[in-house]
Amino acid sequence: MDRRLFIAACLAAPLPPVPARAQAQAKDQLADFGLVLLHGKGGGPGGVIASLAQHLRAQGARVDMPRMEWAGERGRPAGYFVPYEQALRPIGAALARLRAQGARKIVLAGQSLGANAAMAYVARNGASGLAGLVALAPGHTPERFRRPEILRALEEARALKTSGQGQTRRAFPDANDGRTFDVEASAEAWLSYFEPDGPAYIPRNAARLPSIPFLWVIGRRDNLHAAGRGYAFDRAPRHARSLYLEIDADHMSTPDRARADVAAWLRTL
């Protein structure tokens, strides 16, 4: 049987009741692991990724959740003031913290824009000793933004950058999970996130990944689900432990619904 199909079958199989002694042993099943877990746009470490972090920590994993530049509340970021590639810098610091704490198997993971960023970081920095990469409900797809206000803002931001006014701050449009709103941003920083073929373009970043175990988890009620595995996952180099996994979830509930799946996949590494 194909290894990916085998892993998927294992994840889908019903689990028998776990004896108390086995439950105690499960607390150490991920003791060798350290995970950097990145939140999505307008979120934070205590948001939708918190239950996944708690689940992994309960099995012994170390979890570092840096607050990223796109943090905010209710899906709305506080603003964009640092270009996308500079905004990835906290990831390297978080990886270093886990190594200093003694984590032997380090995995980079994220949800939505956090998944986008995790892929972008590995595409630019290589595997860097990583044991795996996890993309949960990947989001922020600038090439798919077709709202008139965003298209107009792209032209305006490009003109500002070209004329040397890239640091000019103003209100720019943003979109998240079907909602549109304005955020404060510098023209240069906003453009780096929203340029259709810019640094946040997921398919190109997937194609630039090294050969590394790669878990892509997408909910069947997520807007990106319709794009299928060919959108980005199949562009990444093949690896025997890579897995494309569809679950019963929407964009926001994916990290919580995928808790057991993520833990089971980690144990295959």
Image (cartoon, rainbow, N blue to C red):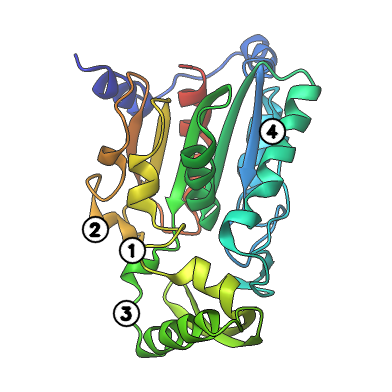
Which is more N-terminal, label 4 or label 1?
4
Q: CA distance from mark 1 to mark 3?
A: 14 Å
Q: Which residue occupies 72% across, 38% down?
A: 94
* Mark seen at residue 226: 2
- Asked if the residue at tag 2 contacts the one at tag 1, i.e. Cβ–Cβ closer than 8 Å, the answer is yes
Vertical side of 238 occupied by 71: above or below: below
Report which quarter residue 53 is drawn in. top right
* Mark seen at residue 223: 1
**Is any atom of residue 58 visible in this view?**
yes
Read off the residue under disc 3: 146
Read off the residue under disc 4: 95
Which is more N-terminal, label 4 or label 2?
4
The quadrant of the picture occupied by the N terminus is top left
Name the residue type under label 4.
Answer: Leu
Name the residue type under label 2.
Answer: Ala
Compare residues 188 and 45 and report the one nearer the observer. Answer: 188
- Crowd band around label 1 with a 10 angstrom C-alpha radius: few (<14), some (14–19), many (20+): some
> Residue 243: x percent and y percent?
34, 30
Q: CA distance from mark 2 to mark 3?
A: 17 Å
Report which quarter residue 268 is drawn in. top left
Vertical side of 268 occupied by 97: above or below: below
> Residue 165: x percent and y percent?
61, 84
Compare residues 206 and 243 and report the one nearer the observer. Answer: 206
Which is more N-terminal, label 3 or label 1?
3
Q: Nearer the viewer, mark 2 or mark 4?
A: 4
Tell me the element at label 3.
Answer: loop
Q: CA distance from mark 4 to mark 3?
A: 35 Å
> Residue 149: x percent and y percent?
41, 90
Query: As drawn, is 12 to the left or to the right of 88?
Result: left
- Crowd band around label 3 with a 10 angstrom C-alpha radius: few (<14), some (14–19), many (20+): few
Query: As drawn, is 188 to the left or to the right of 229?
Result: right
**Is any atom of residue 219 visible in this view?**
no
